[in-house]
Image (cartoon, rainbow, N blue to C red):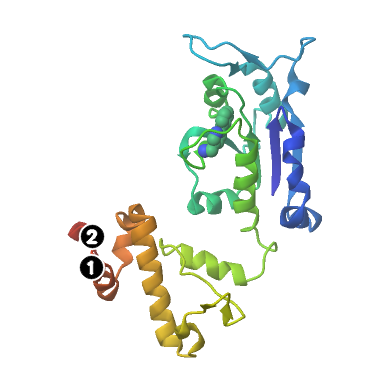
Amino acid sequence: MKVDVVTIFPEYLSPLDLSLIGRARAAGVLDVAVHDLRQWTHDVHRTVDDSPYGGGPGMVMRPEPWGEALDALAPPGPDGSARLVVPSPAGVPFTQSLAHELAAEPRLIFACGRYEGIDQRVLDDASRRMPVNEVSLGDYVLFGGEVAVLVILEAVVRLLPGVLGNADSLVEESHAEGLLEAPVYTKPPTWRDLPVPEILRSGDHGRIARWRRDQSLLRTARRRPDLLAGPAAAALDRRDRDVLLDTGFQISPGDMAE
Ligand code: JAH
């Protein structure tokens, strides 16, 4: 996979040289290039922003440098293989499912906005040539898209073949269940007077699996009830429903499988 990142703060992306992403790059699975947007400015002050049409606070990123950057990295014409990803608090939620989609692309371009964001015409123009995804990591506002790109790339790169061992593809499958994971423990059996739940040391794999399922259900009901309101509810069986009902959690009949 080839990845280009365009930013006015290239040094913010230096964590890409470290750890697993650095290892994926060393292994040849991943080729990342970080570009300074200001290389596509022409004025002496290398201006990238201006005041918003219609008024309002802050500044907006001017379209011209972005247009030249995207023309240089994904030239108009045949070879339409790149996909543009733009982190924004106004984007669609970034999910594990979108991470899988992006991991299947040969070429990703990330555009890091700053200030109040990028002139919308940059995305409208790019979308005439390539798929464009404005994505949000959650309902909070950062200074800019750089740290969001690090998060998205970490989620995508660990899915690339040859980056991780199989232990992690199992974690993947259980998250695909749409429930939060049960708590985990390792040695020692008691630590600071806190014992590991006895059942996990019992060797009874059937009871352990049921205990973990119950913990997943109860955690999800308490912490992320939204996950139990949608399609995840359809994957709940009768026993799951009884566990939840015992705790007073309400599931709409329409959300349940029969
Ligand atoms: C802020 C451009 N959902 C996380 C997130 C992603 C991007 C931004 N903020 C939050 C952002 C300012 C300018 C992007």
Q: Which mark is residue 115?
A: none
Q: Is residue 184 above or below residue 98?
A: below
Residue 131 visible (yes or no): no
Q: Nearer the viewer, residue 11 or 168?
A: 11
In front of the other: label 1 or label 2?
1
Whichever of labels 1 and 2 marks the residue nearer the N terminus, that label is 1
Residue occupied by mark 2: 251
Residue 67 visible (yes or no): yes
For the residue labelled by badge 1, is the local secondary structure a helix, a strand or a loop? helix
Whole-percent x and y of residue 160?
65, 58
Q: What residue type is labelled 2?
A: Ile
**Image quadrant where residue 214 sits:** bottom left
Residue at 43% over, 80% down: 209
**Image quadrant where residue 78 sits:** top right
For the residue labelled by badge 2, is the local secondary structure a helix, a strand or a loop? loop
Q: In which quarter of the image is the C terminus?
A: bottom left
Whole-percent x and y of residue 41?
74, 16
Is the residue indicated by label 2 positioned so its CB lies within 8 Å of ligand 1? no
